[in-house]
Image (tube, coloured by chain):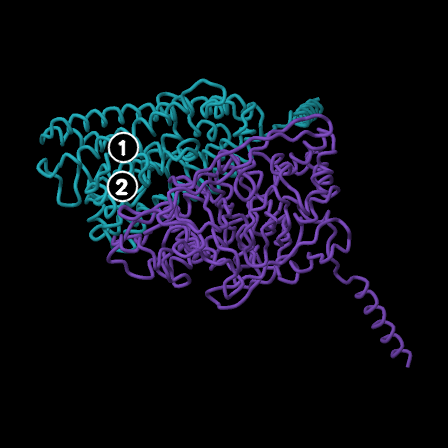
C-alpha cells in the first residue's frame, strides 16, 4: 500500500512539474531583432542585398533558383526568334530586371529601357468577377512601348508640381506631386477612363507575403474602428483567372493579385507581352498591333521557366537589419509604435506552414505590413477601384529592406508612383487612415523625427 | 642557485606573457586597408575604365573609317578594334558594381541576346539611325553584340560587299553610342575628383562615404562582385550552352570570341585580387593576416585562368568536342567562387571592422 502511495505521489509530482514547464512563447528579447525574415534572413548590406537566395537550399533547389535568376534577368526579343522569343507586340519593358532593378524597385519614368512605371486603366463599373472594367482596345494596362512595326498604345508624360509642408517647429519640406498626361493613343481613348500609375516595387520577402495565414491578415481588420485609432483596414478579395476562384489579394500596390504565380505570369504577359500557361492570351489580343508579329508560337514562356522565376522570387532572402543597437534607432522604433505607424505597418507576425521550404515555414518575421488596403487620403488617391479596393485605398507597403533601396537602386523612390524621394517625404504624403500618425509625426521634435527616419533606414 | 635563477626566468617569462598586448582585429590593418582601397580605385578601376575609354575611341574611329571607306583592310581593323574593346570590357566585369550598374551602362552596351528580328525591321525602316535614335532603341539593339553582328555577320562571316550604307550607319551610331553615352560617362564617374563622384565615394569608404559608410561595406561589395562574375561565367554563360548542347546561345558567337570573353572575366577577378600597375591588391590585405588563405585564393585564380588553355577549339565547337576540358574549367571557377563566398567573405567580416 505504501509503495502505491509513493508511486502515485511521484506521478503527481512529475505531472505537476511538467505542467509548470510547459513551453511558452519567448519574450521579444529572446529573439534577434536583426532577423527580419527569420531563417530566411541574410546578412548583406551591399548593392546586391535584395538579390540573395535564402541560405540552406538543397543543390536541386539552388539550381532552380539560379535558373529563375537567369530568366528574371533575361532580355526577351521579338518573335520569331530561336531563343527568348515572344516580346510584345506591345510591352512596357523587355525583362523583369529592367524594372525591378537589383531585385529592388523601378525608376519612376515611362517609355524608356530603364523605366519602371506603368499605368493601369479601366472604365467605371465592374467586370463579371468584380474586377476593374477593361477599356476596349486597351485592356487594363497601357503598354507604352512596341516592337518595330507596331504602335504603342500611348505615351505617358510625367510632370511634377512642387508644394511645401511646414512642421509646427517651422521646418519646411518640399513635396513633388506628379501628374500623368496620356498622349498619342493609337486609337481614341474613352473620355471616362480612369488611370492608375504603379511603380515596380521591391521583391523583398515575397515568399512570406504569400505564406502569411489568411486568418492573421483578417485579424488586423478593425471594422467600424472599434479601438478608435482611425485605422480600419480592408482585405481585398480578388478573382484569380487561373484558379477561377476569388482569393485574398496579397500582391500589387492595391493587393489586387492573390498568388505569386499569377503575379509573375501577369507581369510577363502585361509588362512584356510574353504569354505562359497561366496567362495564355497576348496583352494585345484583339488589337491591330497583333499583325506586327508573325510566326509566334504560344505559350512564349515555357512552363518550366515560369515556374523557375516563381521559385526564384519565393526564395529570395530577406536582408537583415543593421545598427539595431544604435540608441537613435532603438528610440525611433519606440516612437514608430508610439505614434501608431505600426497600426498598419505591423512589425511582427508568424508565417504559415510551408513544408516544401523550411526557411519560410513557421518563421517569426518582421514585414511591417498588414497586407490590408487602407484609405490613404485624397492626395495619394488614384480614384480607380481595383476589386474591393476603392479609389482612395492602397495596400500597406512592406517596409523590410527599405533602408537598402538607396544601395540597390541608387536613388530610392517611395509610394505607389515613386513620388517620394525620402522616407520623410513618404510619411508626409500619408493621409486618410494614416492622418493621425502623420500629425503626431509632425508634432515630434526634429531629433525625434530623425530617430524614426534612422529606424526606417535600419530596416 | 641555478634552480632559483631558473625559477626567476620562468616567472619573468610568465609575467611577460601575461602582459602581452591583446591583438585586436583592426590592429595595424587600417593603413593596409586604405592603401588597398586607394590602389583599387586608381590602379585597377580607373586604369581599366581609362583603357576601356581608349578602346572605345579606337573602335569608334575604326568604324567611322569603315563607314567612309568600306574596304577589307578597314573591316579587319574594325573587327580587331571590337575584339580589343571586348577584351578590356570583359576584364572590367571583375568589379561590376557602381555606375556601370546603377546608370545602366552594362545593359546599355552588353545586353544579350540581340533582337535580330527587330533589328532587321529597323534597318529596313525609315529610322534615321543617328546616335539619338540608337539611344532610344531597346537595349537588345544597342551595344557590343549588335555591333558584332554588323561587322562580323551571323556565322557566315561578313564581307565588305554585304556592308550596306544603312548597316554602316547603324554600326557608326552604335559605336558612338557606346563611347559617348556609356563608356565616357562611366570613366568620368570614377575618375572625377568632385566629392560626390563614385570614385570619391569609394576612396572615402568608412570615412564619410554615403555609399560605403564602413570600409567593410566596400570590401564586401568588391568580394561580392568577384564572386558574381565567377557565378555568371561558371554557372551561366559557360554552363548553359554546355548543358543544352546548343552553340547558338553562346555569348559572342559571330566573332568566335566567347572563350576569350570568359577568360577575360576571370582575369578581371585576378586583377582585383592581385592589383594592377604596381598597386596593392586584396591579396596584400589577406596575406597580412592569413597567408594560407591568400595562397589558396592565388592558386584557385591561377588554376581557373590557366585551365582555359586546355579549351583549344572555339567555345561553340568545344561544347561538343571538348566537354571534359569545359567541365574542368567550370569546376575550377566554382572552386574559386566557393573560396570567395565563404573564406574570403568571412575574412573580411572578421578583420575589416571599421
Q: Is residue A115 left or right of residue A365?
A: left
Q: Residues within 10 Å of mark 1 (few under 14, many from 20)?
A: many
Q: Name the N-terminal-most of marks 1 and 2.
A: 1
Q: Secondary structure at mark 1?
A: helix
The residue that label 2 is drawn on is B308
> Can residue A207 be seen by looking at this rendering?
yes
Instruction: Specify the farthest residue to the top.
Output: B193
Q: Is residue A402 left or right of residue B321?
A: right
> Can residue B331 be seen by looking at this rendering?
no
**CB-based contact (under 8 Å), mark 1 and mark 2:** no
Quarter of the image where one finds residue B280: top left
Residue A106 placement (x, y as % from top left): 47, 41
* Frontmost residue, B189 versus A259: A259
Residue B324 placement (x, y as % from top left): 26, 51
Chain letter for the cyan part = B
Chain letter for the purple part = A
Q: CA distance from mark 1 to mark 2?
A: 15 Å
Q: Is residue A60 above or below residue B194?
A: below
Quarter of the image where one finds residue B69: top left
Can you say which quadrant of the picture contains the N terminus of chain B? top right
Chain letter behind tag 2: B
The residue that label 1 is drawn on is B87
Can you say which quadrant of the picture contains the C terminus of chain B? top right
Residue A327 placement (x, y as % from top left): 71, 33
Amino acid at each position: 500500500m505504501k509503495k502505491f502511495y509513493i508511486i502515485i505521489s511521484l506521478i503527481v509530482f512529475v505531472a505537476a512539474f511538467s505542467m509548470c514547464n510547459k513551453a511558452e512563447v519567448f519574450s521579444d528579447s529572446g529573439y534577434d531583432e536583426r532577423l527580419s525574415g527569420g531563417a530566411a534572413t541574410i546578412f548583406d548590406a551591399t548593392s546586391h542585398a535584395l538579390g540573395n537566395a535564402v541560405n540552406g537550399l538543397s543543390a536541386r533547389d539552388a539550381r532552380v533558383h539560379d535558373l529563375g535568376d537567369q530568366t528574371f534577368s533575361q532580355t526577351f526579343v521579338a518573335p520569331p526568334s530561336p531563343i527568348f522569343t515572344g516580346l510584345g507586340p506591345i510591352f512596357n519593358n523587355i525583362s523583369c530586371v529592367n524594372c525591378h532593378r537589383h531585385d529592388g524597385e523601378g525608376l519612376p519614368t515611362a517609355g524608356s529601357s530603364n523605366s519602371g512605371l506603368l499605368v493601369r486603366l479601366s472604365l467605371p463599373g465592374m467586370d463579371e468577377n468584380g474586377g476593374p472594367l477593361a477599356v476596349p482596345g486597351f485592356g487594363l494596362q497601357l503598354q507604352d512601348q512596341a516592337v518595330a512595326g507596331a504602335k504603342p498604345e500611348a505615351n505617358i508624360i510625367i510632370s511634377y508640381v512642387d508644394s511645401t509642408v511646414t512642421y509646427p517647429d517651422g521646418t519646411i519640406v518640399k513635396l513633388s506631386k506628379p501628374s500623368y498626361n496620356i498622349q498619342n493613343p493609337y486609337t481614341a481613348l474613352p473620355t471616362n477612363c480612369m488611370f492608375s500609375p504603379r511603380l515596380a516595387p521591391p521583391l523583398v520577402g515575397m515568399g512570406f507575403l504569400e505564406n502569411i495565414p489568411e486568418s492573421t491578415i483578417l485579424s488586423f481588420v478593425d471594422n467600424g474602428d472599434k479601438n478608435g485609432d482611425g485605422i480600419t483596414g480592408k482585405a481585398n478579395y480578388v478573382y484569380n483567372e487561373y484558379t477561377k476562384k476569388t482569393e485574398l489579394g496579397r500582391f500589387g500596390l492595391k493587393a489586387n493579385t492573390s498568388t505569386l504565380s499569377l503575379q509573375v505570369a501577369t507581369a510577363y504577359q502585361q509588362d512584356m507581352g510574353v504569354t505562359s500557361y497561366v496567362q495564355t492570351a497576348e496583352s494585345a489580343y484583339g488589337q491591330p498591333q497583333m499583325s506586327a508579329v508573325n510566326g509566334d508560337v504560344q505559350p512564349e514562356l515555357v512552363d518550366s521557366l515560369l515556374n523557375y522565376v516563381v521559385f526564384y522570387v519565393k526564395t529570395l532572402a530577406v536582408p537583415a537589419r543593421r545598427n539595431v543597437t544604435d540608441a537613435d534607432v532603438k528610440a525611433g522604433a519606440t516612437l514608430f509604435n508610439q505614434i501608431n505607424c505600426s497600426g498598419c505597418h505591423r512589425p511582427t507576425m508568424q508565417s504559415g506552414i510551408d513544408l516544401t521550404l523550411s526557411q519560410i515555414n513557421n518563421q517569426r518575421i518582421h514585414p511591417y505590413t498588414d497586407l490590408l488596403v487602407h484609405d490613404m487620403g485624397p492626395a495619394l488617391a488614384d480614384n480607380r477601384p481595383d476589386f474591393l479596393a476603392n479609389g482612395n485605398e492602397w495596400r500597406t507597403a512592406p517596409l523590410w529592406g527599405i533602408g537598402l533601396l538607396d544601395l540597390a537602386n541608387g536613388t530610392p523612390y517611395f509610394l505607389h508612383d515613386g513620388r517620394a524621394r525620402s522616407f520623410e517625404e513618404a510619411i508626409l504624403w500619408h493621409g486618410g487612415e494614416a492622418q493621425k500618425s502623420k500629425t503626431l509625426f509632425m508634432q515630434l521634435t526634429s531629433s525625434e523625427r530623425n530617430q524614426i527616419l534612422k529606424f526606417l533606414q535600419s530596416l | 642557485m641555478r634552480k632559483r635563477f631558473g625559477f626567476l626566468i620562468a616567472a619573468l617569462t610568465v609575467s611577460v606573457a601575461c602582459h602581452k598586448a591583446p591583438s585586436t582585429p583592426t590592429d595595424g590593418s587600417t593603413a593596409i586597408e586604405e592603401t588597398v582601397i586607394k590602389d583599387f580605385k586608381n590602379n585597377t578601376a580607373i586604369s581599366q575604365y581609362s583603357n576601356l575609354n581608349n578602346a572605345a575611341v579606337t573602335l569608334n574611329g575604326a568604324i567611322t573609317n569603315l563607314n567612309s571607306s568600306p574596304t577589307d583592310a578597314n573591316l579587319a581593323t574594325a573587327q580587331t578594334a571590337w575584339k580589343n574593346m571586348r577584351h578590356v570590357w570583359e576584364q572590367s566585369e571583375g568589379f561590376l558594381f557602381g555606375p556601370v550598374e546603377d546608370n545602366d551602362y552594362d545593359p546599355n552596351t552588353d545586353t544579350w541576346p540581340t533582337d535580330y528580328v527587330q533589328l532587321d525591321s529597323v534597318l529596313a525602316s525609315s529610322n534615321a539611325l543617328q546616335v539619338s535614335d540608337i539611344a532610344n532603341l531597346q537595349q537588345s539593339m544597342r551595344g557590343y553584340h549588335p555591333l558584332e553582328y554588323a561587322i562580323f555577320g551571323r556565322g557566315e562571316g561578313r564581307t565588305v560587299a554585304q556592308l550596306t550604307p544603312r548597316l554602316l550607319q547603324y554600326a557608326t551610331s552604335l559605336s558612338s553610342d557606346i563611347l559617348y553615352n556609356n563608356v565616357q560617362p562611366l570613366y568620368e564617374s570614377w575618375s572625377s575628383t568632385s566629392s560626390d563622384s563614385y570614385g570619391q565615394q569609394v576612396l572615402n569608404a568608412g570615412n564619410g562615404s554615403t555609399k560605403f559608410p564602413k570600409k567593410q561595406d566596400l570590401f564586401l561589395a568588391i568580394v561580392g562582385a568577384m564572386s558574381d562574375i565567377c557565378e555568371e561565367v561558371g554557372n551561366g554563360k559557360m554552363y548553359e550552352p554546355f548543358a543544352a548542347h546548343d552553340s547558338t546561345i553562346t555569348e559572342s558567337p559571330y566573332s568566335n570570341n566567347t572563350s576569350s570573353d570568359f577568360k577575360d572575366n576571370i582575369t578581371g577577378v585576378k586583377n582585383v585580387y592581385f592589383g594592377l600597375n604596381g598597386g596593392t591588391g586584396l591579396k596584400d590585405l589577406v596575406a597580412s593576416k592569413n597567408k594560407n588563405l591568400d595562397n589558396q585564393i592565388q592558386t584557385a585564380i591561377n588554376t581557373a585562368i590557366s585551365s582555359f588553355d586546355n579549351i583549344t577549339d572555339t567555345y561553340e565547337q568545344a561544347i561538343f568536342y571538348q566537354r571534359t576540358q569545359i567541365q574542368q574549367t567550370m569546376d575550377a571557377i566554382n572552386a574559386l567562387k566557393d573560396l570567395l563566398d565563404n573564406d574570403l567573405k568571412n575574412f573580411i567580416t572578421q578583420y575589416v571592422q571599421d
